[in-house]
Amino acid sequence: MKRYRFEAAIQRSAGWGAFVFFPHDTLNEFGIKGRVPVQARLAGIPYTGSLMPRREAFHLLAVPSAIMEQLNKKPGDLLEIELCRDDEPRTVVLPDEFTKLLRRRSSSPGLKSSPSPAAKSTETGSFRRNGKKHGKGGWPRRWKRSAPR
């Protein structure tokens, strides 16, 4: 598995934290245009994340604020990064107490499991929107865009 080592300046993101640009073309390197799951080391600290696509040519890798604080880094500082593609399935192990709570909740008579109102019926090929059944087009005629004039 190919490992990538590079140094990048931490960029500030509007609203959700910080990131660095991945300096390679992910389509050439991984054969993927979209999100690429990775295992990384940010200045030696292990991190499981994803290279996320941007509209520009490069992908970005989020830098969690907890890791930035641990390294005493801020936007504009250089960060040494080592990463490789993560092909392992990603799973979440729920604590036993949480699982028991979910089971207790799902067995209570007031809660019923029902399909989403927007779920497509495979038998009829119709859609349900706000509890109303619509034909094969999926949306009522009044919602359809009129043809160009």
Image: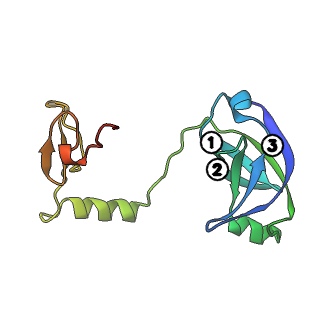
Residue 119, percent from left and from top: 24, 43
In the displayed structure image, the side of residue 55 where residue 112 appears, left or right = left
Quadrant location, the N terminus: top right
Crowd class of label 1 (few under 14; some 14 to 19; many from 20; radius 10 Å):
some
User: Where on the picture, by quarter, is residue 36?
Assistant: top right
**Secondary structure beneath label 1:** strand
What amino acid type should be assigned to the residue bearing mark 2?
Gly
Q: Callout 2: few (<14), some (14-19), or many (20+) C-alpha neighbours within 10 Å?
A: some
First-in-chain label (2 vs 3) = 3
The mark nearer the N terminus, 3 or 1, is: 3
Q: Nearer the viewer, residue 39 or 7?
A: 7
Nearer to us of marks 2 and 3 is 3
- Mark 3 against mark 1, which lies toward the viewer? 3
Looking at the rendered structure, the kind of residue marked 3 is: Pro
Given contact means CB atoms under 8 Å apart, are the residues at marks 2 and 1 in contact? yes
Residue 14 drawn above or below residue 119: below
Q: Provide residue 136's location: percent of width, then percent of height.
A: 19, 33
Distance from disc 3 to disc 1, alpha carbons, whole Å, reads 16 Å
What residue is shown with label 2? 49
Question: What's the CA distance linking mark 2 and mark 1?
Answer: 6 Å
Type of amino acid at the residue the image marks with label 1: Pro
Residue 23 - label: 3
Residue under numbered circle 1: 37
Q: Which mark is residue 138?
A: none
Residue 66 point in image, percent of width and height: 69, 68
Residue 133: in sight, yes or no?
A: yes
| Residue at x 17% of width, y 62% of height | 111
